Image (cartoon, grey):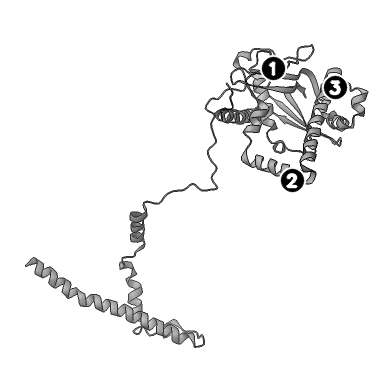
Amino acid sequence: MMSFLCINRKCWRIPMLLRGMLNQEGFRFRSLAASCSLYGKKKTTIRYENIDQEKYRDLINYLTSYKDSSQRPELVFEEDNMLNGPERKYKNSDQEDEPKVCRNWSPLMNPNKSSLPQETVPGPPLQISLQRKNLASVTAVLQQTMPVEQAFYLEKWKQRMILELGIEGFAEYTKNIFQQGKLFHAAMETLLLAEEISVEQEEDTNVSGYIRSVQHVLQHVTGVRVLESAVQHETLHYQGLVDCVAEYRGKLCAIEWKTSGKAKPFLRNTFDNPLQVAAYIGAINHDANYNFQVDCGLLVVAYKDGSPAHAHYIDSELCCQYWNKWLLRLEEYKEKDFGIV
């Protein structure tokens, strides 16, 4: 009996469903006919109060019945979730990645040296020769972990220079640049030791411009403690050769002399050089050969044409920031397994 009633109810609903479908088809046909007839007529202004409400009753009923449609927005979203899973929340491209944290962090300053006096001790500056040990060198670490963007522009510059000079010409160019750097550092060492430059160095056009460039900086450099001396971090196992440790405007600094053919008025123009300074400072502080600590740096960029060098002072707070970046680069270098203990 129950089955008969269900079948009877379904049969009773069929005419209603057919009538609804016919009404919709009729509406679509009438809409299409109206559109075609209006297409060929000139556009006229129709006032709302002149519309025949009875004539468009089916249209009004169709539009207002949307709220009962099976395609309501919330049902569409539910169906999409069932088919494709819940919506995934992707990180906005404008959001910056979380800063990396060094797993083997080490302090820049050595607590075992905190009680040592910081006054300048009279005597010749330290000049410890660099021993070839199985330690990571500061220069190698920075070269092997160079950021992708920086490496891209360096390679682009290299290819452009090769196109202009040829392979042999580019090799000669880089050799001359390297030789000029060595001559400049030798001249600075002689200048800071003897406080004067020999006649040969003054007449050498390869370095005379650089020396004129740094004169205004040297006026504020006193109390030289270290010149071209090897430093090594006894805990992190890396080494390097620091150019100079002296007082600059009364503040003890690790000083690096750099040459450039292009002006570098801002610290950001010097790429990885501040990380190099921070690495040397950390090594000095954790090297038993040095009975003092340094917490500031000075990066001096000299120019061949003699224009005033740019002296970038790196205070203790900024030095700590570069130190943290250096630790990440050192960690990356060791993870690449370059055979360093």
Q: Which amino acid is tagged 3?
A: Leu
Q: Do callouts 3 and 1 mark residues in contact (Cβ within 8 Å)?
A: no
- Judging by the rendered image, the residue that carries numbered circle 3 is 191
Image x and y of residue 148, in percent: 62, 40
User: Could you tell whether 202 is left or right of 75 in the image?
Assistant: right
Image x and y of residue 65, in percent: 32, 71
Mark 1 crowdedness (10 Å alpha carbons): few <14, some 14-19, many ≥20: few
Q: Secondary structure at mark 1?
A: loop
N-terminal of the pair, mark 2 or mark 3, is: 2
Q: Secondary structure at mark 2?
A: helix
Occupied quadrant, residue 229:
top right
Q: Do callouts 1 and 2 mark residues in contact (Cβ within 8 Å)?
A: no
- Marks 3 and 1 sit apart, C-alpha to C-alpha, by 25 Å
**Number of the label disc, if any, that sits on residue 160:** 2
The residue positioned farthest toward the front in the image shown: 168
Mark 2 crowdedness (10 Å alpha carbons): few <14, some 14-19, many ≥20: few
Q: Which amino acid is tagged 1?
A: Gln
N-terminal of the pair, mark 3 or mark 1, is: 1
**Is 28 situated above or below 170?**
below
Q: Is residue 64 visible?
A: yes
- Judging by the rendered image, the residue that carries numbered circle 1 is 131
User: Could you tell whether 334 is left or right of 157 in the image?
Assistant: left
User: Could you tell whether 128 is left or right of 204 in the image?
Assistant: left
- Marks 2 and 3 sit apart, C-alpha to C-alpha, by 37 Å
